[in-house]
Amino acid sequence: MLLNLQFDAEASKISESLMFSCENHELLREDITQLKKEKLVQYIQEEDLPEIIPCQMLMFFENPKKARVVFFNPNFTLPKEVTENHFPNKDLIEQCNLNG
């Protein structure tokens, strides 16, 4: 997966860590599959996903050895089935609430 990010000087100053961003990123279904194989994401059924998922992306450095990459879509809402089946989707719901 190729990440095409730009340095965000203003956000870096506010967060006091290096921050990079991308306004328009296309996350592919095979990217999700690869991330699952590498155990970087879990609990995703990629069969239900579209081939291309438009999103925005942030990357920031938590420390010199660890960076965090966040993919998000500000227009995304969780389907009703996710919120009805709360227990297995608890982490997803909590993360969505934090971002929304």
Image (cartoon, rainbow, N blue to C red):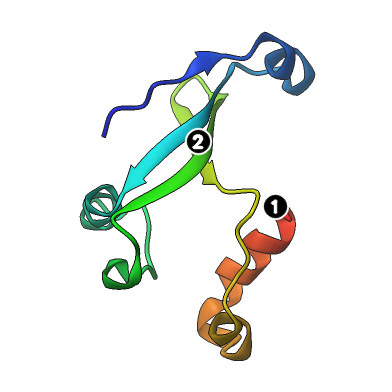
Residue 72's x, y, as percent? 56, 47
Classify mark 1: helix, strand or loop.
helix
Q: Nearer the viewer, residue 96 or 38?
A: 96
First in sequence: mark 1 vs mark 2: 2
- Give the image location of residue 74, x and y in percent: 65, 48
Placement of 89 over or under 81, stated as above or below: above
Task: Check the image and name the residue furthest to the bottom.
Answer: 84
Residue situated in front as seen by the camera: 38 or 34: 34
Q: Residues within 10 Å of mark 1 (few under 14, many from 20)?
A: few
Residue 70 in view: no
User: Badge 2 is on which residue?
Assistant: 68
Residue at 27% x, 57% y: name it. Answer: 36
Q: How many numbered marks are there?
A: 2
- Three-letter residue code for mark 2: Arg
Would residue 19 appear left or right of 43 to someone viewing this image? right
Q: Quadrant of the C terminus?
A: bottom right
Up the image or down, 42 lies above or below 87; here it is above
Q: In the image, what residue occupies the spot 49% across and 32% down?
A: 24
Q: Quadrant of residue 4?
A: top left
Q: CA distance from mark 1 to mark 2?
A: 15 Å
Label 2: few (<14), some or many (≥20) within 10 Å? few
Q: Residue at x 50, y 83 (%)?
A: 88
Q: Position of residue 2 (x, y in %)?
A: 29, 28
Image disc number at residue 34: none
Q: Secondary structure at mark 2?
A: strand
Q: Amino acid at mark 1?
A: Asn
